Amino acid sequence: MSIIEIHNLHKTYTDTSVPVKAVNGINLSIKEGEFTAIVGPSGSGKTTLLNLLGGLDTPTEGDIFIGGMNIKNLTSRQLIDFRLHHIGFVFQSYNLIPVLTALENIAFIMELQGLKKLQRHEVAMKLIKKVGLEGKENFRPGELSGGQQQRVAVARALASRPKFILADEPTANLDSHATEELLNMMADLNKTENMTFIFSTHDKRVMDKARRIVTIDDGKVVY
Amino acid sequence: MITGISWRNLWRNKLRSLVIIAAVAIGILGAVLSDGFMEGMMDQRVNAAIDNEISNIQLHNPDFLLNNDIIYAISQPEQYLEAIRELPQVKGVSQRIICAAMASTAAASAGVTIAGVDPEEEEKVSQISKSITLGAYLNNQQRIPVVIGKKLSDKLGLKINDKLIVTLADSSGTITYGAFLVSGIYQTSNNLFDETHVFVRAKDLGPMLGLTNQVHEMAIALHDNQATQEVFQTLSDQFSSQIKNQKIDIKTWDMVEPLLKSMIEMMTFFSYMFLVIILIALSFAIINTMTMAILERKREIGMLMAIGMTKGRVFLMIMLETFFLSVTGGIIGLLLSYLIVSFYAQHGLDLGAMGSGMSYIGYASTVYFRVNESFYVASVLLIGITSLLSSIPASIKALKLNPVEAIREIN
Ligand SMILES: Nc1ncnc2c1ncn2[C@@H]1O[C@H](COP(=O)(O)OP(=O)(O)O)[C@@H](O)[C@H]1O
Ligand SMILES: [Mg+2]
């Protein structure tokens, strides 16, 4: 069963001198447990697509169904709640709260969800181990390498037990070794946890790790 | 954890936060100390006025208050005396004969107010006997003693045992003379009072004026000034018929000196004004700092909103940070103020050279600070309100952030 259905999705920016059709008629369905790379050159519309998918931005036209529900029908307040409970986010950078430790960053999202302190701590500690950062749980983001920070971000995304995780160019700031490590870890979590990952990249090496590749250009799915 | 985040965020730019914390602390310190100084000064002025000049409650012939003529006396004062002395709050009652006179020596003269008193009773009511700096009080064996103020002794060049000639008009309007010997020189904190008030025995002054069994003023001293209103009520009820028949008039110290009372009220008002003005000034600095902090953290706040933090929580986070920023400074300021006020409450602040000018208008040259509890409470509340209001502009900035745009700045 597909957990994401995208129908005839359009996003046109009109605040520019010439309207930009950043997403221009995309149809796509993603099944539970998929490990999907959205690939395309810079400016092709990857970020716009992921933002629409994550409920951060609203489409000009078309529908997005998540778990069978059209997210267009949610109020902005409901959408915040929906993001908190159903979608995991990993951004390119500035993922973490600098004044919180790795462990606290992971626990924080569970606090937003209203989990009890003991449970938060337990789950966060488990996730720290899972992403291979045991011993670094009390480090603040500034004391971690870029790759380690992204792993904390993935752990944070997992901690909210979402339906899927969206990662917009998660490896863009990483060197090739850290990129490889992060992708392997994500692929691993995809298998062991059956977590659905959708990530964007324009990096050839990253594409190799993906099990499904959706190539877009000029706001359209090319193949 | 939001509380923790806010507190830690405060220390991300240590210098910037410390500057604001110091500014708040100094501002509060300034407001509290100035209030402590002013209240202390007023306290002393009031106490001095009550102790030396007015006492707590006074009885007069109502006409005497309009026209200080000696003919407007209270007749048969003993009808009041017993009842007043019976009240447990009363420390003493002094019956005074009061008249205006010209005091002269061979060299100079000055207009004065002469009070003829019973030395023992007067001692319970006013501090004059304790303010004698040279010589002795009225209760010595001298023939016709007078106690004068230091200022008058300087002015007329009088020393102990010198003769002072007093010229006055008796009850029939005839000018008479009397000679007194200076037995003591007193000094209070009010130079003007010292220059114009002299004390003699009622038994010497009464016959000179042709008054028998008549007094102009009954000054009542209480053990505690707090009881003034209560005693005033009791006496007003007890003597209601005499009051109605215009035989006597009862006044509390603040009715006798309404200016003193309104000065206290004005000083209190200014203290609060000063506090509010300082806090308004500080709020601009707080607003500026918080807005800067939020603009620097745009992407982080955008990220938090993206992953599912509600506007309410973002607002709470910023409000708490502003609160910590202001309240940390406020607490430091209040603690320092409290310590300094306590110190000067005990040891007093000597105004030195400036103080001698102050004492001419009735203020002590050493000020013992006092801050009303309500001023501390008001400070705490106002700091809280200031921090709450100051957090609004930064919060609005944050809530206006569009997470998509804030995040896009990342990539
Ligand atoms: N807020 C915006 N306003 C106007 N144009 C935008 C905005 N965001 C993105 N675009 C444009 O939309 C197109 C797609 O951008 P984006 O989704 O960021 O692509 P990618 O992530 O693949 O680089 C680009 O041409 C970009 O300039
Ligand atoms: Mg992009």
Image (cartoon, coloured by chain):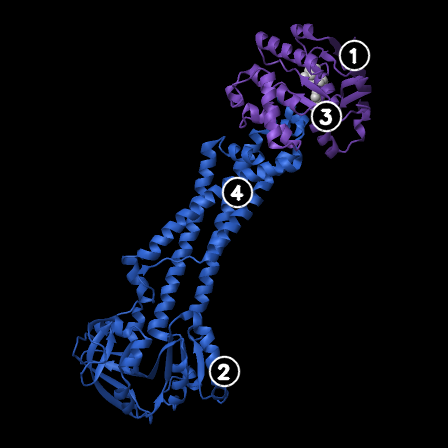
Chain colours: A purple, B blue
Instruction: For the residues labelled 2 and 4, say whether their Cβ atoms are less than 8 Å apart.
Output: no
In the displayed structure image, the side of residue B293 where residue B309 appears, left or right: right
For the C terminus of chain B, give its image quadrant.
top right
**Where is mark 4, residue-wise?**
B284
Q: Quadrant of residue B306?
A: top right
- What percent of the width, then of the height, locates residue A65? 81, 23
Residue, x 48% and y 81% (percent of image)? B236
- x and y, in percent, of residue B324 in the image: 51, 40
> Disc 4 vs disc 3: Cβ atoms closer than 8 Å?
no
Quadrant showing the N terminus of chain B: top right
Judge depth for marks 2 and 1 and give the one in front. 2
**Disc 4 is attached to a residue of which chain?**
B
Q: Is residue B348 above or below residue B181?
A: above
Q: Secondary structure at mark 3?
A: helix
Q: Nearer the viewer, residue B176 or B253?
A: B253
Q: Residue at x 64, y 11 (%)?
A: A183
Give the chain letter at badge 1. Answer: A
Residue B99 quadrant? bottom left
Ligand 1 falls in quadrant: top right
Q: Are marks 1 and 4 in contact (CB under 8 Å)?
A: no
Can residue B285 be seen?
no
Q: Name the residue located 64 percent from the left edge and 9 percent from the top edge.
A: A184
Note whether B263 is above or below A89 in the view shown.
below
The residue beneath circle 3 is: A86
Between the C-alphas of marks 1 and 4, the distance is 52 Å
Q: Nearer the viewer, mark 2 or mark 4?
A: 2
Which amino acid lies under the numbered mark 1 shown in the image of this protein? Val
- Report the amino acid beneath label 3: His
